[in-house]
Amino acid sequence: MISCIRDVRKAKGLTLDDVGKRCAPPTTAQTIGRLETGTRTLSLHWLNRIAEALGVDSAALLSLPDQEELPVAAILDHKGAHALDKAENIYQPTIEPAMLALRVKSSIGDYRAGDDVWLSRRAPEQFTGALNRDVLVPRPAGRYLFGRLIGRENNRLQILPLGSGARQQIVSDPEWIGVAARLVREL
């Protein structure tokens, strides 16, 4: 991971001393400078303190290095973690054109507070391929419905909202739907 503290600090027009004073508890400009340059280890504790001082999410202070793949160190299965038989890599997810996101503020169904759900935007002729998937459906007056697409009859979608005891809702003629494609969850 690469620290973006300096970039965010400069974009906000703050000095090292300003950030140090905003930290709780306050620290020195020298410490902030060392954390920015990597001469001092940036722990999770420091990352969160600096993010709060800058008024940003801690993720905004980090970026992945310019590598497109991440080597897999081990495999976890029912027998525990073990070495790979052959080398594997995980590739960075790509953002498709017209992709959307849904941010979860409170836990519901399989989703937890803090989750981000990446949605693949689909046109009406693609709705059938989203059956039995979680979808975001636009509704009139800037409202939305999020739930499982359980049926489609002509131009009417049958959506089962998440959560126990929810009743099926019908949405007619939506211009598009967002199909849940990727879950981003911080541990």
Image (spheres, rainbow, N blue to C red):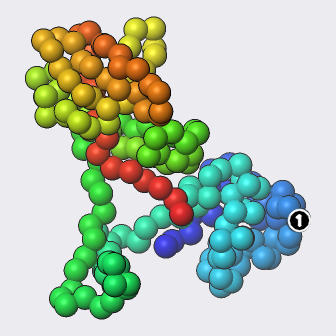
Give x and y (percent) for residue 108: 51, 39
Q: Secondary structure at mark 1?
A: loop
Query: Is 27 left or right of 56, judged from the image as shown?
Result: right
Give x and y (percent) for residue 70: 32, 75
Residue 66, above or below 150: below
Q: Amino acid at mark 1?
A: Pro
Q: Residue at x 56, y 69 (%)?
A: 3
Give x and y (percent) for residue 158: 27, 20
- Res. 132 in view: yes
Q: Residue at x 24, y 44 (%)?
A: 96
Where residue 27 sits, quadrant-wise, is bottom right
Q: Looking at the image, which is closer to me, 55 or 172?
A: 172
Q: Looking at the image, which is closer to me, 1 or 19?
A: 1
Query: Is 61 left or right of 46, judged from the image as shown?
Result: left
Query: Is 87 left or right of 118, judged from the image as shown?
Result: left
Question: Where does label 1 land, which residue?
Answer: 25
Residue 103, above or below 122: below
Where residue 72 sits, quadrant-wise, is bottom left
- Res. 146 in view: no
The C terminus sits in image quarter: bottom right
Q: Residue at x 19, y 33 (%)?
A: 131
Q: Residue at x 30, y 13 (%)?
A: 171
Give x and y (percent) for residue 34: 71, 79
Q: Looking at the image, which is closer to me, 98 or 5?
A: 98
Q: Looking at the image, which is closer to me, 111 or 36?
A: 111
Q: How many marks?
A: 1
Residue 176, above or below 130: above
